[in-house]
Each structure stands twice: as structure tokens, then as C-alpha cells.
Image (tube, helix red, strand yellow):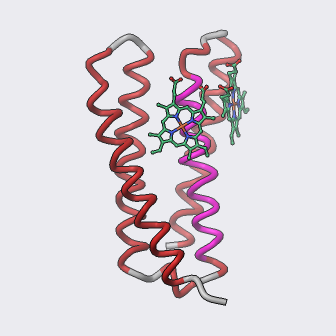
Amino acid sequence: MAVRLIKISVVYFVIGVCLGMYMSMTENLNFSPVHAHINLLGWLTMAVAGLIYVGFPSAAETTLAKVHFWVHNISLPIMMIGLAFYVSGTKSAEPAIATGGTLMVLGIIVYAINILKNVRS
Ligand code: HEM
Ligand code: HEM
């Protein structure tokens, strides 16, 4: 789980900084929230979760860890694609943002429970 999270996080890192460069070059800052969340929920959050699992391998192999992994990785693209359409003017994409965002919050709660239950000194 740790290795998978770390590898997926760098894919989001590349997408996030490319979008940042595109925004700078075109001076189109509409995509700021998409760029911010790809970097923060894709790159940083997944890299940190992966590194925590490196330090606490027993927490990485639980069902809670697997549920968080899948919910995070399914909800993030839904939320980001929805948000990209929304800031581009397709206001009907709002349900995708709401669904992706709600799933993401639920996944993060599962992750928090996993850490509280299974990370021990
Ligand atoms: C080559 C790398 C990057 C470029 C070219 C870039 C470019 C940009 C640009 C042009 C904006 C809009 C600024 C504005 O609205 O005035 C922005 C916003 C933002 N960027 Fe980046 N960025 C890069 C990397 C990152 C990384 C690595 C992170 C986080 C780990 C990040 C997080 C954010 C956040 C949170 C915002 C929103 C800030 C706000 O609304 O106040 N960026 N970035
Ligand atoms: C389920 C998780 C999350 C949801 C549903 C969410 C939702 C939102 C929304 C609706 C906005 C306002 C966007 C706008 O109108 O421009 C926003 C902005 C922002 N969020 Fe989140 N967020 C989440 C997680 C996070 C996390 C984990 C971080 C940081 C680690 C973060 C950092 C930010 C930042 C920096 C902004 C300002 C971006 C900008 O000005 O473009 N968010 N978020």
C-alpha cells in the first residue's frame, strides 16, 4: 500500500505542476482550485500517507487502509474532473464535485480511524 500510494502521488505531482505552468503561461487562473487540490490531495496527502505506512507497516495492511486507498483514488479524479468542468463554465458538473468531495471526506475519515487504531509506538 505504501509503495502504491507514493508512486501514484508523483503522477499527481507531475499533473499538478504541469497545470500550474499552464496557468502561469496562459494567465488563466480559473484552474487554481483544481491545481491546488491535485497537488494537495493527490501529491502531498498520498505521499504523506505512503510515508506513514512505511514507518508503520502494520497499519498499511489493514482493511481500513485498503478502503481508504480505493475511496481516495476513485473520489479524487471524480472531484477534479468535475471541478475542471465547473470552473470552465459547465455548472451542471456540480454533482460530480459534491459526490467526489463527499466520498473523499469519508475516505479520509476511514484513513484517520486506521491511523488512530493501528499506529502504535
Ligand atoms: C511548477 C510548479 C508550480 C507552478 C508553476 C504553480 C503555479 C501556480 C499558479 C499560477 C497559481 C495561481 C496563483 C494565483 O491565483 O495568483 C497557483 C496557485 C496555487 N498553487 Fe501552485 N504552482 C506550482 C506548484 C505547486 C505545488 C507543488 C503546490 C502544493 C504542493 C501548489 C499549491 C498551490 C495552491 C494551494 C494554490 C492556490 C493558492 C491560493 O489560492 O491562494 N502549487 N500555483
Ligand atoms: C474532501 C476534501 C476537500 C474538499 C471537498 C475541498 C473543497 C474546497 C473548496 C470547495 C474550495 C473553494 C474553491 C474555490 O471556490 O475556489 C477549496 C479551496 C481550497 N482548499 Fe480544499 N477541499 C478539500 C481538501 C483540501 C485539503 C486536504 C487541502 C490542503 C491540504 C485543501 C486546500 C485548499 C486550498 C489551499 C484552497 C484555496 C484554493 C484556491 O484559492 O484556489 N483542501 N477547497
Residue for point 34% across, 39% down: 78
Residue 44 horizontal side relative to residue 100, left or right? right
Taking 54 as reference, is 67 above or below it? above
Residue for point 42% across, 14% down: 88
Residue for point 26% across, 18% down: 92
| Secondary structure mostly taken by the magenta-highlighted segment of the chain | helix
Residue 59 horizontal side relative to residue 80, left or right? right
Taking 113 as reference, is 82 above or below it? above
Magenta span includes 46: yes
| Ligand 2 quadrant assignment | top right
Taking 35 as reference, is 63 above or below it? below
- Where is residue 46 drawn, in percent x and y? 56, 57
- Quarter occupied by residue 98: top left
Residue segment shown in magenta: 32-53
- Quarter occupied by residue 97: top left
- Quarter occupied by residue 23: top right
Q: Quadrant of the C terminus?
A: bottom right
- Where is residue 87 drawn, in percent x and y? 44, 17
Taking 59 as reference, is 66 above or below it? above
- Where is residue 119 drawn, in percent x and y? 58, 82
Magenta span includes 118: no
Residue for point 55% across, 28% down: 33
